[in-house]
Image (tube, rainbow, N blue to C red):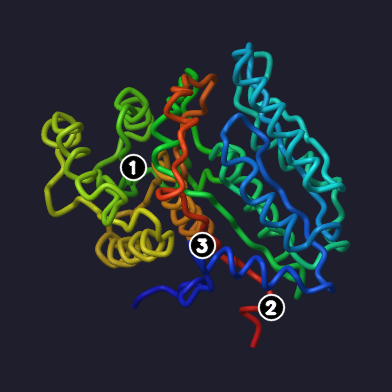
Amino acid sequence: MIGARRWDPCVSHKGAEATGFIADFFRDASRKILLVAGAGFDPRSTSACAAMAVAAGPRTTGAFIREQRPDPQPELLRRAEANSATMRSLVAAGTEVCIDVFAADGAVIGGRAATLAIQKFPLSDFTDVVVDLSALSVGVAYPLVRYFFQRLAAKAAPNLHILVTDEPTTDGAITAIASDRVGTVHGFQGGFGLDKNAKGVKLWLPQLVSGKRSILDRIRSYVDPHEVCPILPFPAIHPRLADELIEHYGEELENTWEVDSRNVLYADQRNPLDLYRTVLRIDDARKRIFETVGGSMVILSPIGSKALAVGALMAAMERDFPVAYVEAIDYRVDFNLMDQRHDEGRELIHVWLMGEAYQP
């Protein structure tokens, strides 16, 4: 029996449809919006903020999160400060919320710190909460969305929306320098490591992206999966991207991970719902197969595209999947590539997670 799916059907938009939805839906004078977004060095920081400012103007309150890491590079700091200033100029009621991603001892605390900081915004003041994941790390974005999802679950309002500006070229210009801590994202342990799940068959679903070989190797050692089903973007903006990733990770796929070609997952690079539904189908099938031998545990590692990370988030929240992750302690950036205009490759994606659209 296939398990119930919360977001099937789901209200979502991308590209011109997403832009049109924001302009039309949030123009309603009765709507009061809390916009939570990352105010980092990523040029996508300001995109959703600008769209919301045009649509809702003074009815928008901004919580602009600055993720603070040890010893930031001066240019990254300068760009983050400039983006934060731009966002606060677009949204008059915007507040910069600074959080430490790491504790003094190196422990990852960003997700917990973000959820604590955001609690000063009373949700009863708003009709809609919009979380823009474009410039937030997974370790901060996932706990924030789960916090809002749990807080709003029993209420008719506010609505909860996710926005993300997907731009693969910008992703390619940013290389994360991983910390030495591997673990699960705050709020997404999903029973990983508990004695009662010790006999479960672990399936690891990592998103593949170029240049993350060492990070994936460390996550795999931490997860110690029985099986691996890598996630490849297809269709993708660059038609041969999936083939290039298979070639890039050939040694891992054939020898280290021992991946059968039938176990490679393909998900539309810009359709979060495609990955969401695929992961749930796999979970449904494995529950039937392994229910008599200790059960099955699906473990996600969203280190690829922004849009696919949204699909993984939705699946993880619905089925309480563990999310194994390595937080970045610094970034190496190709500024020449990042500063080029990528209008053709940039697309805004909107997912309506909960609220009036799903009420009978």
Q: Which picture quadrant has residue 108?
A: top right
Residue drawn 52% across and 56% down? Answer: 348
Residue 195: image location, x then y, percent: 45, 42
Of residues 259 and 246, which is closer to you in this image?
Answer: 246
Q: Residues within 10 Å of mark 3 (few under 14, many from 20)?
A: some
Label 2 sits on what residue type? Answer: Glu
Residue at horizontal 53%, vertical 49%?
165
Residue found 82% across the figure and 44% down from its top: 94
Q: Is residue 256 above or below residue 285?
A: above
Viewer-nearest of discs 1 and 2: 2
Residue 153 position (above or below residue 299): below
Judged from the image, the secondary structure of the residue bearing numbered disc 3 is helix
Of callouts 2 and 3, the N-terminal one: 3
Q: State the CA–CA distance, disc 1 to disc 2.
A: 33 Å
The label on residue 356 is 2
Q: Amino acid at mark 3?
A: Glu
Q: How many marks?
A: 3
Give me the disc on residue 318: 3
Amino acid type assigned to the residue bearing label 1 in the image: Pro
Seen from the viewer's position, the closer of residues 360 and 258 is 360
For mark 1, what is the residue? 206
